[in-house]
Image: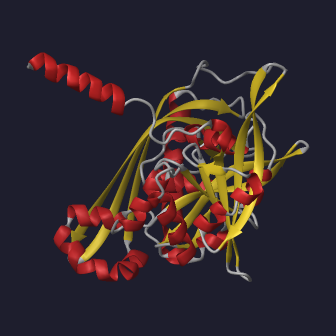
Amino acid sequence: MKKIILIFIILFNAIFTTGCWNYREINDMSIAVGMAVDYDKENHKVILTTEVVYPMVANGDTKIKPEIIKAKGKNIFEAIRNMIPLTGKKVFWAHAKVIIISEEVAKNEDMLISLVDFAKRDAEYRDDIWMILSKEKTAGEILKTDVLVQDIVSFQLEDILKNERGVEKYEAIPLWKFVDDLAAEGIQPSLPTVKITSYKDKKIAEMYGTGVFKGTKLVGWLNGDETRSFLFVIDKIKGGVIVVEEGTPKEPIRVALEIFKNKTKVKSIYENGELTMKINTETTVNINELESQIDFINEKGRSKVKKDAEKLLESKIKKIIKKVQKEYNSDIFGFGSIVEREHPKVWKEVKKDWDKIFRELKIEVNSEINIRGSSLRSKPIKVGN
């Protein structure tokens, strides 16, 4: 009897569980690798620009050819379906890398919610697809830029986002993170921004800065340097450079400090009915570049660089927090979520007035810089007379 049951199970698996139930030939599909969403206010239509790729055989080699397709619709889904009369094929979204949204879409709460809802609801979209905010007039023109390394714009944008560690002037945000921040209490979402810049004879997409949201509405921008300070606060610094200007009798000398690691701890203090956020950063760096023959590597010079770097970092962190508090009143730092975690009873009392409290929230910053070395040289370059 056991043998009969085993044979039956094997036959059942062989008949019913092999192959793909939704198998489709690759030639029957348009494979989307990136999408850009704009909004036509006059006609109340979504404008969807999609970068699709097709396999091509040339001289015996298989190559991928990118193509830009543009369609309109009352919503995202209708715009996608309106691509079929243009291509003759259904668009396949499982390999899409980026969603680029325009400022017009980001400032329209209903439109942004509709886009996010569709992306989360549709089975083909991946939760880790990257979301980007365009600083150009339209999002679609980002997909029409030139490329430097990759042959496909969407793939190049994905590479830029994945290699954020060395720059720290933007934060890569996947779809799931943006949605989580929308739903969570005590934190507001943000997105990296992309713009078009000139490089030699090309127009290329450059990732630089952050879009600040309040709920589902875009309320402001941070530039690249401000974004680095923001990333220090939320403990997302993994690398990058701190440039310190050292005063000398002749002129200021710049010293470049390469960041190896950073740890930020943010703690909420509740005393006498008042909340204070204490921010402590501890950063390990190397002296990586000197602009002068003056010795900032010896003990005295290194001590001065350390103190000046600490003051600089503290100042920049305070400045960016104050800007976001006063100009945007959007808690992208997640201070509210920290209060909720550390003082749940207090949070229940203050959350309804958090907008007002956040704007006036007291901030204390302490930064510690540890200079562990000076790369391959222990002395500055000396130039003879």
Quadrant position of residue 351: bottom left
State which quarter of the image contains the C terminus: top right
Give whichever of 208, 273 is nearer the camera. 208
Q: Is residue 143 left or right of residue 25?
A: right
Q: Nearer the viewer, residue 65 or 199?
A: 65
Relative to 27, say whether 100 is above or below: below
Residue 6 in the image: above or below residue 81: above
Q: Residue furthest right?
A: 201
Residue shown at the point (39%, 75%) measured from the top left: 358
The residue lying toward the viewer, choosing from 272 and 250, is 272
Query: How far from the left and from the top, in percent, is residue 60?
Result: 80, 19
Q: Position of residue 147 (x, y in %)?
A: 78, 40
Q: Residue 251: give x, y in percent of width and height.
A: 75, 46
Q: How many badges with numbers are in the image? A: 0
Question: Where does residue 165 sit, x and y in percent of width and height?
Answer: 55, 39
Viewer can see residue 203:
yes
Residue at 75%, 29% in the rendered image? 63
Where's the N terminus, which quadrant? top left
Q: In the drawing, does residue 116 fall left or right of residue 7?
A: right
Instruction: Examine the rendered structure and indicate whether residue 2 appears above or below residue 371.
Output: above
